[in-house]
């Protein structure tokens, strides 16, 4: 069986590299084109990309591809699916052009996440939201995955919200530098240092979970407070959670619920088994030890304890550029294909 | 005028070294003896201490002192004041022996902090608690300073509690490795990694602020939830705070109150001016840049903003082994002398 | 075909964990017993090991094994092969007891490396040295792998010595903290810091290459100067080499020789292809990016350039606890089995 | 006595900030103007500078100055001295314009270091080279300080070269990230990583010592081989040295010579006493512990030992942006004033 060709938009950045790395050898998909900004266009990908993913060289076949511009009309004939790792202000506009030209756009960018007709999708949490794509105007559609902090958060919280109901949520993050892309943070700023995230990360963490945990037509409704801090970690976001749940369940009840969840996941190539790992060690989860679990796609939860203010506190952790970005987009792509929704 | 002789208990550890470093050249006090565990006793301090404070060698005069055992009867004649940097299970018992032998014990250890007759003291916050020493049975007394996270927390929160009233408090920490002493954390665990604090740190952060912010006879009464996480930072604890205040003041009102506080501090040698620095930069405070402010004794506060769950959120930061430990003890010692309470 | 049972001595340490991790699923061998110091004996391995290898949990089957003492008489019946990750002063004596009791001892420890009848073995470099085992007195034998810095060094230098002849060698290392075991270095010492290696590492780097690059009966003879420095890197030793070669070859000639070497390696399960990677990037090799190459078993060489003092300078790099320790021992074990030398 | 006004060229960068920090309160000089690239010109320095030096805020008086363009005609009336922290390709041209306009240019840039009429000056090593300024054509003159690695190197080696004679030199560096300026290195590249310096640093380290250690009219003549590697250290370059000295002196003789050197230094405000610290600890010097010695102006030397290839090996270390850059320039400025050479 031949594999479905896909193009990578924003292919030279950190998430673009991860997409190429993880699609190498994928059973269903194959990278058929790489596109990036104008300063890379026309040159072989292997020459322009500052490839520096640990332990793997860039796929030779992709390295030889000439970089294309991010324009629908320049995609190879027959290619109808693009994975977008675009950043910056023009991401939304470019993705919109691909959508209206009939492409399926699976995006890691934030531009379209708030649009009520665009699914903000985590296949293990809200696969039913994928139905939104059929309501989008235009020939194609856009599907997005959430911010890298939000993925582990909603995977840890979805069973609690479904069974118990979240009434309020406080989140503090310990975020890795890879989340800032490349070159991203300055070494001078990050060596032996941490600092408050200066961007709009906190706003994303406060709004995206509500869309994901809500119904297709109506977001969930509870207050969320987020504090986002960058720490000198390479990969892996640790998230501290204080949550107020209806009925004031005990930590043991919360742990039992999480342990019994996600047993009947859809069979997608990148779904890890188990999806959610519960650790009993008091100093875990920790990014360097746990971020690669489940081939970078698992979420680790630990220290589920009583919180004197909110009721329950816990930590959750996932690999931010895999589970929280490139792997999230690929999982969405797999879901779309399994539902027969690819063009 | 001759300087008052003091002894350092637990002199070889991280906090002991900082005490010696910061008493070098102090206008009122002079290190006259160093005491440590039995394996160091009888040898010159300079030979047994793994001195490694950045940029300063150990004071020559102290380096030549023979290390004494931590016993009241072995202190030099005329010395009546000990600063304790002891750790471990026996700290409380040793301090108790010094107290009952008539010494003033200024302690950084946690053993006696909960005792209702022992002041848990931050000179700029609750100097009136020092009166408790006169109620203690025995010839001497014990005065303690709080946990290294609690010092910046109560300095940032005391004006808010006094003027507005705290109703609930959520705290998340980003703690430096020096807080674990030496050798402390393993490099393997901390390089490019963070991990939940496995000890009873969270309990301390949940209880100590109530004693400090309360009256001498009755602790303050509001729920506190703490999450404590170690990060790969050398010195300086960053504390994220979400706080519910009576009357729901705006961030601007909170900032204005903090800016106008601490203007009339008592004149002690180690009190920084200003004590509380308010930063407007979105990615500050940050430990490597701000921990040394005010010679390591200032507290930096930033990002005072609306919190959708608790009302107000902010960051505060201080140097954990200076403002949060050695400098805190020396400030207490200075307060005692200024009140005429030293034996 | 059933797999050959092996025991791990020193199983709870950093290298012991790596041995267990890498033997999981090995086509020829299976961990059948784990042994460690007396404080772990009798308890399940999973409970006593501070397992913290990134991304992998300890093999369940091994986690359930009770830890045995490091005594030949306590090994399971039929088990004749031990891999030793022992450290400390007693390693040599314990290994000697296993050897004289008829075991094949494949050791990562340094105790026996200097013994003229004990091969110091890198399968891709001096496989013929394995013949020494038949000259050892006693029922069994000992085979050792070199110091973690020496493995990449001799893999990079062996073709040059064979074809051109090394006349003098200067080595400076940039060594990862995992080389110190667990807990190893203090985080306080290593965060944002580097420091000269205080042990006898430099002596090992100065002597071991001579034994490996020499004939079975006579070490190579050229002066070696080593400087060993610990840097805040998790895994992967970068080695800077200045080398004086007979005939003063150009950098291009050296690169061409290295590129054409190692094409006809013996077919062992853990041999990477290619063994030696030549990078053209000016800021490579770099440990975080290159140490995992070839599943942690490849050596990366770069920046082959003119040296005004010695003639040629270059960098080489390998994963220190895999290629330089656990993987090195397993490769030796594979070589022994392929030669029919296992008991 | 009024202080001599100076301007800082390239004032917003890492070295520019250090110049301003260290001239605050200087007994002889006062910052009277700050100049930078066109995108900062006309705005208050405090608004455009990404100030982030640990523990100190920017001097208020300087923060309020409007940034000037780097043009001689725009300097304040009466100001005749500029300190240049310029980088990039245009540094040499700008400095040349100031020189021909009659300014004394004390430069940290590399553009003019090779010019035979421009002194490459370290006041404690080759103060007599300052006489070159009188041979320069044009109204003013340029004085330069060396590369940040070269300063500690020549301070450690000058006594050896003078008394014994250097025959060959091998240098390996462990360089801090601050040497790359701000933003400089990417955090992704440097966290838990080291990498070969990709620029022309090695060339500078190979040539600059010869000019400094030579006579005014003729550089010293011995081969130098340099390997330069960036490590995840904030401040402080550790330099490993293997050196061949005439007469093959013992390590003890070298140590004795270094200990007795630099006793009669000229009395300049920034000269530390002692200038050269000899450590006996086996794991020192180490950047985080030793770079700040002597207020950042001392050089620490340790591990003077036999080298089997070159004769002697040792480590030296200094703070790269103070002793190796801003402090070096200020020391040169002080020397010029003490010699009566300022315009």
Image: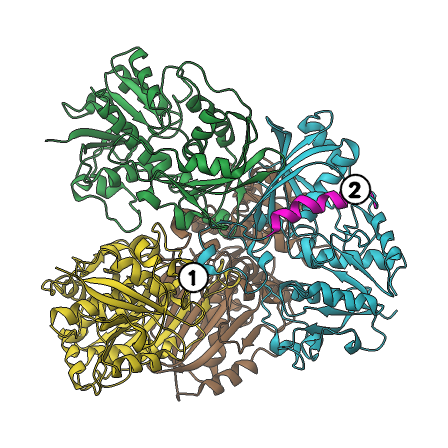
Chain colours: A cyan, B green, C brown, D yellow
3D distance between C-alphas at marks 2 and 1: 44 Å
Residue at 83%, 43% (x, y): give it: A264
Nearer to the camera, B27 or C221? B27
In this rendering, the answer to whether A332 lies above or below B273 is below
Image quadrant assignment for residue C4? bottom right
Q: Seen in the image, is C80 located left or right of residue D127?
A: right
Q: Percent x, y for residue D230?
A: 42, 66
Q: Mark 2 points at which residue?
A: A214
**Magenta part mainly helix, strand or loop?**
helix
Horizontally, residue A60 falls left or right of residue A76, namely left
Which callout, 2 or 1, points to the residue nearer the camera?
1
Magenta segment boundaries in residue numbering = A200-216
Q: Please name whichever residue, C162 or C283, is drawn nearer the observer in this view of the structure.
A: C283
- Image-based side of A17 in relation to A194, left or right: right
Where does residue D219 sit, x and y in percent of width and height?
22, 84
Q: Residue furthest front?
A: D77
Looking at the image, which is closer to me, D130 or B277? B277
Reading the image, the residue beneath label 1 is D48
**D26, above or below B322, in the image:** below
Instruction: Look at the image and tell me whether residue A162 can be seen.
Output: yes
Name the chain letter of the residue that bears numbered label 1. Answer: D
Provide the secondary structure element on which disc 2 rests: loop
């Amino acid at each position: 069986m031949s594999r479905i060709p896909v193009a990578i938009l924003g292919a030279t950045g950190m998430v673009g590299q991860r997409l190429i790395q993880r699609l190498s050898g994928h059973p269903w998909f194959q990278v058929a084109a790489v596109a990036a900004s104008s300063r890379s266009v026309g040159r072989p990908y292997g020459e322009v990309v500052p490839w520096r993913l640990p332990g793997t060289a860039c796929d030779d076949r992709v390295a030889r591809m000439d970089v294309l511009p991010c324009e629908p009309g320049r995609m190879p004939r027959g290619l109808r699916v693009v994975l977008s790792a675009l950043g910056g202000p023009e991401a939304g506009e470019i993705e919109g052009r691909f959508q209206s030209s009939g492409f399926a756009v699976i995006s890691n960018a934030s531009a379209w996440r708030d649009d009520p007709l665009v699914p903000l999708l985590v296949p293990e949490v809200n696969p039913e939201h994928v139905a939104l794509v059929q309501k989008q105007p235009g020939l194609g559609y856009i599907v997005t995955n959430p911010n890298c902090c939000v993925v582990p958060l909603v995977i840890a919280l979805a069973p609690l919200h479904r069974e118990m109901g979240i009434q309020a949520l406080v989140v503090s993050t310990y975020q890795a530098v890879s989340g800032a892309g490349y070159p991203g943070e300055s070494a001078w700023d990050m060596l032996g240092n941490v600092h408050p995230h200066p961007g709009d990360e906190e706003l994303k963490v406060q709004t995206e979970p509500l869309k994901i945990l809500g119904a297709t037509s109506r977001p969930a409704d509870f207050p969320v407070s987020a504090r986002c801090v960058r720490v000198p970690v390479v990969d892996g976001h640790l998230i501290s959670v204080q949550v107020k749940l209806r009925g004031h369940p005990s930590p043991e009840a919360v742990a039992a619920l999480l342990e019994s969840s996600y047993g009947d996941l859809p069979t997608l190539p990148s779904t890890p088994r188990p999806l959610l790992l519960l650790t009993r060690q008091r100093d875990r989860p920790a990014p360097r030890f746990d971020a690669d679990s489940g081939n970078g796609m698992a979420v680790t939860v630990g220290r589920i304890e009583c919180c004197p203010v909110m009721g329950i506190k816990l930590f959750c952790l996932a690999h931010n550029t895999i589970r929280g970005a490139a792997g999230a987009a690929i999982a969405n792509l797999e879901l779309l294909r399994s539902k027969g929704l690819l063009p």
